[in-house]
């Protein structure tokens, strides 16, 4: 079993190579709990709050919904509705993160062979439910990548 099958998707296989549903369910509960123990992401929020729109919640990203909360438009987890950031903020500022081994990537080729700087597989999860929201391969010294910013 590949590390990605086990650690990212949380699928466990039985002796015949078929998914072991009870073991997979138990493993996924443990994976989500482990992600909820990751560190807070260190990134400046860097945005003024967006005012409420009065509009219904709408999906704006694969894992994010924009919705009103009190006097502010915010971004919330599509799975558990946990507010991760203001609408205009770097959404990863409200996520938990973990620098995983590059060996967790399928077809892993260690970039250290060609580069002087170490790289990492940085992963981001919702603090509310542990759902994996983003992954990026970056130099260990790099700040979290800002893939989207709403105006
Ligand atoms: Zn969530």
Image: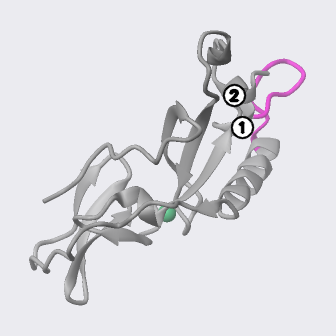
Q: Which residue is mark 2?
A: 104
Q: Dot 1 surroundings within 10 Å: few (below 14), some, or many (20 or more)?
A: some
- Above or below, 100 against 51 in this view is above
Task: Give the Cα separation between the discs numbered 2 and 1.
Answer: 8 Å
The residue closer to the viewer here, 97 or 17, is: 97
In this view, the residue farthest toward the front is 116
CB atoms of marks 2 and 1 within 8 Å: yes
123 in the magenta segment: no
Magenta span: helix, strand or loop, mainly?
Answer: loop
Residue 78 in sight: no
Count of picture labels: 2
**On residue 7, which mark appears?**
1
- Above or below, 16 against 14 in this view is above
Q: Where is residue 31? Give x, y as percent.
A: 72, 51
- Nearest to the eye among marks 2 and 1: give it: 2
The reply to whether the residue tagged 2 has its Cβ within 8 angstroms of ligand 1 is no
Q: Where is residue 68? Give x, y as percent.
A: 22, 78
Q: Where is residue 145? Give x, y as percent.
A: 40, 43
Q: Residue at x 73, y 57 (%)?
A: 34
**Is 5 situated left or right of 56 in this image?**
right
> What secondary structure is found at the residue carrying circle 2?
helix
Q: What range of the chain is rendered magenta?
A: 12-21
> What secondary structure is found at the residue carrying circle 1?
helix
């Amino acid at each position: 079993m590949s590390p990605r099958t086990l650690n990212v998707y949380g699928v466990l296989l039985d002796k015949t190579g078929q998914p072991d549903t009870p073991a997979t369910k138990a493993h996924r509960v443990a994976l989500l709990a482990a992600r909820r123990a990751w560190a807070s992401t260190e990134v400046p929020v860097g945005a003024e709050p967006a005012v409420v729109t009065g509009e219904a919640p709408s999906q704006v990203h694969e894992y994010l919904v924009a919705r009103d909360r009190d006097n502010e438009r915010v971004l919330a987890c599509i799975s558990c509705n946990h507010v991760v950031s203001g609408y205009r903020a770097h959404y990863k500022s409200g996520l938990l993160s973990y620098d995983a081994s590059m060996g967790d990537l399928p077809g892993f080729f260690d970039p250290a062979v060609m580069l002087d700087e170490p790289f990492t597989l940085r992963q981001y999860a919702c603090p509310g439910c542990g759902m994996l929201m983003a992954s990026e391969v970056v130099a260990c010294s790099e700040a979290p990548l800002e893939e989207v910013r709403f105006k």
